[in-house]
Image: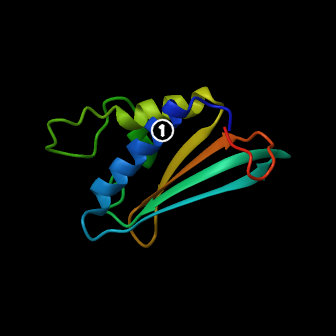
Amino acid sequence: VEARKNEIKQVLLNLFRNSFEAAGDAGTICIETDMVEEGGKPLARIRFMDDGCGILDKDPSNIFLPFYSSKLGKDTNLGLGLSVSYGIISKYNGSIEVKNREAGGCEFTILLPGVPCEPGERD
């Protein structure tokens, strides 16, 4: 993926924080990464899954709106983390989606255009 690592780091840390808060002390968080192909083009896929409370809104994609928060009673939460994350991923022609999981919790899927590289090649 060609992107500024600090911006991608911000997105990933935000998703980690949200998953930790949703899953609680006894919860489970699973992160999967792989490469997929769409329209003949490589895409890096990152999936965050947790078994927390899920998203109670009828339209889970509302969580990407600025100042939207499902964390009622949390004074320090401005509801900007996922909106900023959405903007960063969009900046790199990627997508970020969320859905509630049938077993409980939610799943975020990030897709970013991939750049072909040799195994073991690193930035």
Residue for badge 1: 9
* Quadrant of the snapshot with the C terminus: top right
Left/right placement of residue 52 relative to residue 41 reads left
- The foreground one among 65 and 94 is 94
Colour scheme shown: rainbow
- The foreground one among 84 and 66 is 84
Residue 39, horizontal then vertical, whole percent: 83, 45
Q: Is residue 78 above or below residue 53?
A: above
- The foreground one among 69 and 57 is 69
Residue at screen point 69% across, 43% down: 122
In the figure, residue 112 lies in which quadrant? top right
In the figure, residue 81 lies in which quadrant? top left
Residue at screen point 37% across, 67% down: 51
Q: How many badges with numbers are in the image?
A: 1
Q: Is residue 79 visible?
A: yes
* Quadrant of the snapshot with the N terminus: top right
Q: Is residue 39 visible?
A: no
Residue 47, horizontal then vertical, whole percent: 54, 56
Left/right placement of residue 23 relative to residue 93 reads left
Q: Is residue 68 above or below residue 49?
A: above
Residue 61, horizontal then vertical, whole percent: 46, 44
The residue positioned farthest toward the right in the image shown = 40
- The foreground one among 25 and 86 is 25
- Give the secondary structure at mark 1: helix
Residue at screen point 78% across, 46% down: 42
Residue at screen point 43% across, 30% down: 84
Residue type at mark 1 is: Lys
Residue 18, horizontal then vertical, whole percent: 34, 49
